[in-house]
Every structure is written in structure tokens, then in C-alpha cells.
Amino acid sequence: MDLGLKGKVVVISGAAGIKGSIGETILQSLANEGATPAIIDRNSRGFGYAEGLQKKGIDASFFQTDVTDPEQIKIAMDGVIDKYGRIDVVINNVGVNDGVGLDASYEEFMNSLKLNLVSYFLIVKHALPLLIASKGNILNIGSKVALTGQGGTSGYAAGKGGVLGLTREWAVDLIKYGIRSNAIIIAESWTPAYDNWIKTLENGAEKLKSIVKKIPLENRMTTPQEIADTCLFAISEKSSHTTGQFITIDGGYVHLDRSLLTE
């Protein structure tokens, strides 16, 4: 399906993760659709990703940025604007489940919010004039933790809860410009980071089996590609009358009746 994303300038944060991560998978999927990704991330592997896409004829750019620093975000967004002169989509994908719980300091809690929530606000704030000009749209990557809690991660839960709040607020605030704002909610997805976490556990194999058994649809984790495919549909004109929505991609993990779990 041609999603009509060819030539669209898409600002995507957190897209320089390990190959196979959600952000990197979304990035490659954007490129496959002919979009023009502007990558904002602190990890220098983003230079390699941008160079690789450029060799394929994609006008990708990387702006190395610590998104907890407002000035660095401004510099990055100014760079995007100077290079392309337009922004069609913002995908806020930054998210670190950093374990900042009730035992953390004020500074640690605030830093978690800066990363997981405030960066979303600032990127959209700087992109807004060009989003208005293009009648573009915003997609925020959220987490089931905002809805279910997890324990031991107050900063991340508050940040991701705030992301859902901003998604609805922006849908209302920007509707007069024809700008759509939606969120993707992710639960259990098999990523390199998840694999690394499982390997740190003494009973990792048993823990993984226990988690997978609790996912109603096919008793398997969501793949990053399934998430990326939904993201691309959500930002495309194929989803042109969808705004203010939380789209959950989780095989029924959060919402379906537990009676489905017969074992």
C-alpha cells in the first residue's frame, strides 16, 4: 500500500537505538516509504543510520541531541528547519523505563520527566509553525505503564501518563489548524533492550515464558515491525480522520478479559 509519505519530512526522536529497536525500525520503515527522516537522538549511531539511508537516496539527517537539554532541542529543531524548510510529521519516540521510583531524589524524578515527557513538548513546540503550514500531524509513542502502572518506576509512569494527556490536549488545541494528534501504546514488545533485560535475570527464561503466556493473542510479544507498520498508517492520509486516539498494539495484553488465559 502506498501511504503517501514520499518526500514527507518526519522529525523522529529516539530513532538511533540499537538495530531492531522500535525507533530504528520505525526509521527504516519511514525510509522504505520514501519519507525524509530527521533523526533526533543522543546516540552517535544516528550518524551511521543517516549515512546508510543517504546511500539509498533518502535525504535523511541526524541531529545529535540530549533531549533533556532544552537548548540542544532548540538547536536541533533549528537545524531541521534550516535544512528542509518544512515539517510534515513529528514522531516522539523517546522513552526510558529508568526505574526512578519513590525512593529516588527530586533531581532524578525531574530528569526522568525531562526525558520522557518534556522532550515531547519542546519538540512539538519548535515544530509547530511548520506543522501548521503543512497541516501535519503528531504521533506520540506511549506505554501501557501509563494505564496499568508497573511498580518502582514513578518517573516513567508519570512521564508516559503525561504523554497521553498531551496527546489529547494537542488534538483539541490544534484541531483549528487541521493538525491531528495521536498516541501509540505499547505493552510487551520483543526488542534488543528487552532481550538484554531478560538476560540479566537469574530466572530469565522462566520470566519470559510467564510474560508471553499472559499475552492473549497468539501468546507472543508484539514485534517492532508491527508497531512501525501501525505508526506509518497513523501518520498517513489513510488515517486522515483519526485524532486524539490511543492506539494500543499489544495482542490484547492490557484490555482483554483475563478469562482468555485458561492456564
Image (cartoon, helix red, strand yellow):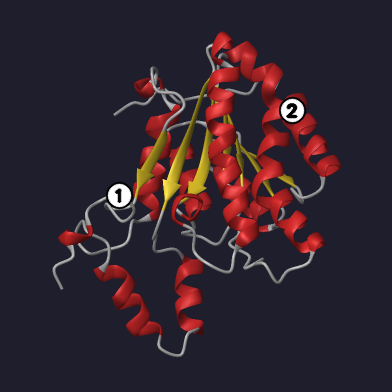
Q: Where does residue 51 sit, x and y in percent of width and height?
A: 63, 47
**Residues at discs 1 and 2 in contact (Cβ within 8 Å):** no
Amino acid carrying mark 2 in the image: His
Residue found 51% across the figure and 60% down from its top: 19
Give me the C-alpha separation between circle 1 and circle 2. 35 Å
Residue found 57% across the figure and 9% down from its top: 176
Q: Nearer the viewer, residue 32 or 66?
A: 66
Q: Which residue is mark 2?
A: 126
The picture quadrant where one finds residue 189 is bottom left
Please say whether residue 62 is visible from this viewpoint. no
Question: Which of label 1 and label 2 is nearer to you?
Answer: 1
Amino acid carrying mark 1 in the image: His
Q: Nearer the viewer, residue 163 or 129?
A: 163
- Furthest-bottom residue in view? 202
Left or right, residue 48 beside residue 150:
right
- At label 2, counting other C-alpha atoms closer than 10 Å, the crowd grade (few under 14, some 14-19, many 20 or more) is some
Q: Is 54 located above or below residue 87 in the figure?
A: below
Please say whether residue 211 is visible from this viewpoint. yes
The picture quadrant where one finds residue 48 is bottom right
Q: Quadrant of the N terminus?
A: top left
Indicate the secondary structure of the residue bearing disc 2.
helix
- Furthest-top residue in view? 176
The picture quadrant where one finds residue 11 is top right
Q: Which mark is residue 255?
A: 1
Left or right, residue 208 beside residue 257:
right
Q: Nearer the viewer, residue 27 or 113?
A: 113
- Furthest-right residue in view? 71
Q: Where does residue 141 sit, x and y in percent of width and height?
A: 51, 44
